[in-house]
Amino acid sequence: MTQIMTHDGVRTGPIRHSVNGSINAKGSIHDDATATKLGMRGGTVAGSIHMDLFGPLLLETFGERWWETGNLSLYFTNATTDREPVQASLGIPAEGVSDLQVEAWVDRADGMRVAEGTAAVGHPEAVSALMGRAARAVESGQLRILSGLSVGMQIEPATACYTEATLKDYMGRITEPMAMHDSSRWGGAVVPLAGYVNVLYGQAIGSLRRQIKDVVGLFGAIEIRNVHGPLIVGRDYRTGGKVVALGESPKTEYFWYETWAEDSNGKRIAEHRMQLRFMKASSPLYQ
């Protein structure tokens, strides 16, 4: 059972060691050789993996209602490598408020900030960390790696499913196993928070990702939203979405996009906002 500590208006989970499950994905940012060549300390842990650190904290703070109408919105500030110690924290909300938002963050054990943002339940007045973050507008013609993308470009509809086999494999390395990943009152096992990204990124965005070749990418920011959640293991969902912004930094080009997942009756179950970054140093277009 997760030991949650409370101090100075903050709930903090125990120190965990997030696993780089893609360390053998050669040519990716998770591969040691590729990552160090691009200036990283080693192959990086996907930001989505750190989201699982929040499961028990969200349950303690918001109850199971979070999996029905809650969101978690994180901007990643520093990458970690395989099994580096990390710790998640949430602000403690005021009592008697049903729709609310609190600060959320992940720190490495030495104090380095890994991610920062917000968590909320219901429909608070405040906007989430990522929805409130101004997306720098850049025309696609100014970009090299992302020249084929444009704001408003649609993501092709697809069918996505987080399978029982995927869950079984992931439970061997998840930092916060929870009872709801076995069974729940929603009629099945709940998809882990990192698994939301499998469905809403990994299986939804293939039509865009195929246009971006010969370059190393990484997650810059992730928000997952339960609309009429949660996502359930083994169920098929219809996904789609669109590009909402393009931009660049000195080291990367990036785009923001939104995706959604609907059940077989057309009900919106979950939504997702992500910033995907692409390393200029890894692209022949910048050589």
Image (cartoon, rainbow, N blue to C red):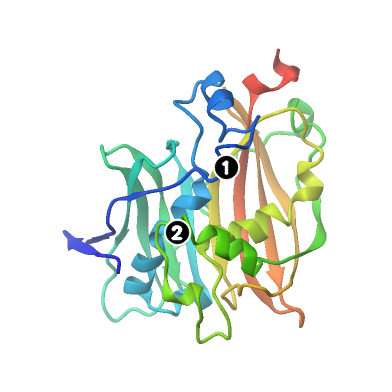
Instruction: Give the SS element for disc 2.
Output: helix
Quarter of the rendering containing residue 147:
top right
Task: Of the two numbered discs 2 and 1 on the same chain, state the one appearing first in sequence.
Answer: 1
Kindly identify which residue carries mark 2.
52
Compared across the picture, whether 99 is left or right of 286 comes to: left
Q: Nearer the viewer, residue 230 or 103?
A: 230
Instruction: Give the SS element for disc 1.
Output: loop
Residue at the top extreme, as displayed? 287
Q: Is residue 128 visible from the viewing direction of this image? A: no
Query: Where does the image place residue 181, in percent across and percent down from the top left?
Result: 50, 72
The residue at 44%/26% (across/down) is: 41
Residue 5 in the image: above or below residue 115: below
Mark 2–mark 1 distance (CA, rounded to whole Å): 16 Å
Query: Where does the image place residue 132, in percent across and percent down from the top left?
Result: 50, 52
Kindly identify which residue carries mark 1.
22
Residue 176 in the image: above or below residue 36: below
Closer to the camera: disc 2 or disc 1?
Answer: 1
